Structures are given as C-alpha cells and as structure tokens.
Image: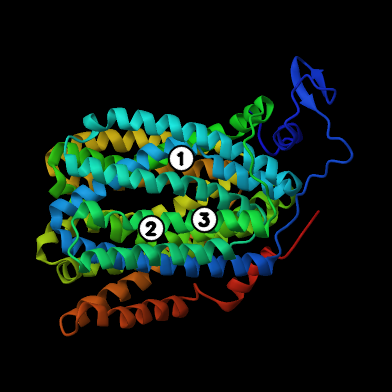
Amino acid sequence: MVTSRSPQGAFSLATGYPPNSSTARSRGGRASYKLPAKTAIICHMVAPRQIAFNTFLYISALALQKVFSFVYFTILARYLGPADTGRYFYAVSLTFIITVFIDLGLANVLTREVAKFKEQGSRLLSQVATIKLLTSILIIVIAKLLLPYLTPDPLTQILFIVALAAMFMDGFTAIFYAAIRGFQTLKYESLATIIHQALVLISGLIMIKLGAPLRLVIFALVVGSIFNFIYSWAIVRLKLRLKLDFLFSKALIKSIALMTWPFALAAIFVRIYAYLDSILLGLLKGSEAVGYYAIAYKITFAFQFLPLAFVAALYPAFAYYWQHNKDLLYVTFSKSLQFLLIIAAPISAGLITLAPLIIPSLYTTAFAPAIQPLQILLSTLPLLFLNYQIGALLNACNRQGWQTTILGLGMVLNAVANLILIPLYGPLGAALASALGTTAIFIISISIASKVSAWDKRLLLTTVWKTALAIAALVLTLRFLSGYLSWYLTIVPGALAYLAVLLLSGLVKKEDWHSFRNSLSKRNT
C-alpha cells in the first residue's frame, strides 16, 4: 500500500506521473519515484496559536450548529409525533448510508495532500471532484432502482429523494472544505456551519408554522445545502484561487485510489455502523420504533462536535509529530485523551440521571419509550469520544489499514447484535447493540494505538478514578436538587460540584493546560 508518508506515494499523487515515466526506476520489481529538485514537499508545523484558534473557532461553530440542530429536531419531533419522526429519520439515515459510497474517504486524503502540496491544490481538487461526480451519478441511479425494496412507503420514498438531493450537494461541499482545511484555516467552514444550520432551522420553522406536510418540511435541508455549496465553492475559487476543471488522469486516479481505500472502507464502516440500527428498526419494528430511537440518538450525538473539533485541530499536529518528534506525540495524545474523558464523563452521567425528566419535558410523554435507549447510548459516550481521538492518531500515523480493520470488525459486531437484539427489545435492543460496538472498538483501538505511539497509562488511570469521584458528586447534586427544582436549573449546580471535586483532587491544574499547549509549540526538526 502506498501511503502519504512515503515520498513515492506523495509524489505520484501530487504530480500524477505514471510509473513508466523518466522519474521512475525499478527497484526489486516495484516502481519508485525520485523527487525532482523543483518539487518541494511542504511539511511544516502548524503554529500553536493557529491550532488553538482553529480549535476554539471550530468548537464554537459546531457547538452553535448542534444547538440549532437540536432545537430544530426537538420542535420537529413534537410537531410530527413518533411515527412521522421515524419516517423522517429513516429517510435521512438511508441517505447517509448510500451517500458514503459517493465520498469514499476522498475528503480526508484531499486535506492531507493539499496541506503538503499546496501548489498542487487545483489539480488535486479537480481530480477528486471528477471522481465524486462520476460516483455520484452511479450511486444515485443504483439508489433509485433499489428504493422500492428499501422502503415501500410512498411518503418515505419522497423524503429519501429530497434528502438525497441535499446530500448530493453536501458531498461536493465536503471536498471544497477539505481543500480549505489543507490550507490550515477553519474560519470559513466554521461560519458556514452556523449559517447552514440556521437556514435549515428558519426555513423548517416557517414550514411548521404554516402547517406544511412532512414532504414539504424536509425541503429545509435543501435550502441549507444550496447555501453551503455556493459559499464553499466561492471561498475555494475567490480566496484560495483554486481552479476546478474536469480532470481524468489515470495515474492520478490510481495514486488517489491507493491512498484513499483505507479511508473509504473506514467511512463506509462508520456510516453503516452509525445508521444500520435505524434501518433495521424501520424494517423490523416500524416507523414508530425508529421515532423513539431517533430521539435517543439525536441527544447522544448532539455532543459529537467536541471530539470532532479536537480531531480537526490536532490531526495535523499528530501527523507532524509522528514524523519529527515522538516525544511530543506522546504528550499531545495522552493529554488529549485526558481532556476528552474529563469533558465526556459529566455529560454522560448528567444526562443519564436527568433523562426521565428531560424526555417528557422536551418531547412530550409520547416519547417516553426513548428514555431507556438514551441512557444505554449515553453509558458509552466517554468511550465514543476517545475512539475519535484514537482513530485520528492511527490515520495521522499512516495506520489507516488498522483503523479500517477495527471499524470493519465493529460494524460486523454491531450488525449481528442488532439482528439479534432488535427483534427482542426494539429500540432498546438497538441501543444495546450500539453500546456493545462502541466498547469493542475502544478495546481494540487502544491496544493498536499502544503499538503506534506510547501514551501515559498512569495519567489515564488517575483521570478515570478522580473523574469517578467528581461524577459521584455531580449525580448526588442532580438527584437531590431535581426533587425541588426543574431539571434545567440543576445543571449549573451539578457542574460546579463536578468541577469542585476535580480541583480538590488535583486532576485539573493550570500548569497541565500550559504543558499541553507548549507541546504544540515545540519543534524538533
């Protein structure tokens, strides 16, 4: 497998020269390449202030986007009821699974290669866009043919077609932002993330206010996608000065294929893992069961932006340290695991405690069957957060193959568990299957990561038991106060109790944060 760490692989992707060109020579029957002097490999460290700024900006944007998304879905669920909420979520889930075969992990590779070969940005973007256009046409035709078998319900079919149109535009938007990320800036994407979700929220609320049927309400997704597509393309063309042409280079496609297949398989595994439970619920238990599970799923993954933002900001640092400074990779990775655990644990415990109060309050008692599935999904939220960071480490250190294998095993385990548990327990069975898969992926991933980069096991163990003490204080505070106050009034006192125990235990220190930041500012070349 040719990887980006190899000069040969990087050169072939950036230039597209075929193996039989004058730059190639045979070595043991394998093609290898020599970089011409004029070709510069751009491999520089991301400035620590830029990493910090990107992290803050992207986390803020994703947080606000998640707030808009959560508010909109809550209002939508109350408006539609369990059955139509299930139809909506089923159609979107089906669309997400199908469109992953359009992306094929191209965005990850594009970001990585543009970051190293900025002068080849237009060529790389054009080739990736051409591949995406061809795969989009093929997958859309196949999806249209399979639609009657995927859902016999006419309304769900309409919802699927509209959602597919939105996802088609989102697919190209994703590669535009992938190229922008290669220039190590997240400000444009951060702004667009907020505007996109705001447009969906506003247009959806207008439809709901007018009493529009579900088949019209779903067009809110298209409104947001149109804006995001136009905006991202304008940034690529006007700000970055990248040109987009139809490009079909066999040598370049081959190089991209060699690099992207681990990402493609990983993306397919992740998407199927994430949405197969909803599809099986719809097929085996009906739309109402999907509606209950959708509520639990949405609440749990409303916090997904936190690990994603960490990955977006730290992925370039991981890749740099892997090649230039293993000690700083050790420090940065260990601290990132600690911080994610400290963030995820109170979210998980707090929501599990308050779930019986939150669901009836936000979604009405009609969605009471979503309480237990929500608590099960939340129980493995800390492991889910850590899985994102471990996966980023493996990808950054050219271990895409291992990451893909891990995700594939998790997908298979999850699918088997869903087929066994959904017929027995419905939405609760889907939640149990998801928790089982998340746990299995974590156990395997952390074992593999230990072979790639050392990490501070003592630090993580200390973090676990001290965080557990803080969680006990959080849960006791929430349970006590919820008997006297509304659930949302207990959140701040519970958070303060959690932070107080963390500070008293010495787990959170000012110098720890400074040490983590300093690890991003050192350079040893």
Q: Secondary structure at mark 2?
A: helix
Residue 243 in the image, given as x and y percentages of width and height: 67, 47
Mark 3 residue crowding within 10 angstroms, few (<14) / some (14–19) / many (20+): few
Q: Would you place residue 275 above or below residue 207 in this image?
A: above
Q: Would you place residue 464 above or below residue 144 in this image?
A: below
Residue visible at 75% across and 54% down in the picture: 44
- Separation of residues labelled 2 and 3 (CA atoms): 11 Å
Residue 209 in the image, given as x and y percentages of width and height: 21, 69
Q: Secondary structure at mark 3?
A: helix
Q: If you read the primary sequence from the N terminus, does the residue marked by circle 2 or circle 3 appear first?
A: 2
Residue visible at 56% across and 66% down in the picture: 55
Name the front one of labels 3 and 1: 3
The three-letter code of the residue at mark 3 reads Ile
- Closest to the observer: 25 or 346? 25
What is the quadrant of the N terminus in the image? Answer: top right
Residue 267: numbered disc: 1
- Closest to the observer: 262 or 393? 262
Residue receiving disc 3: 230
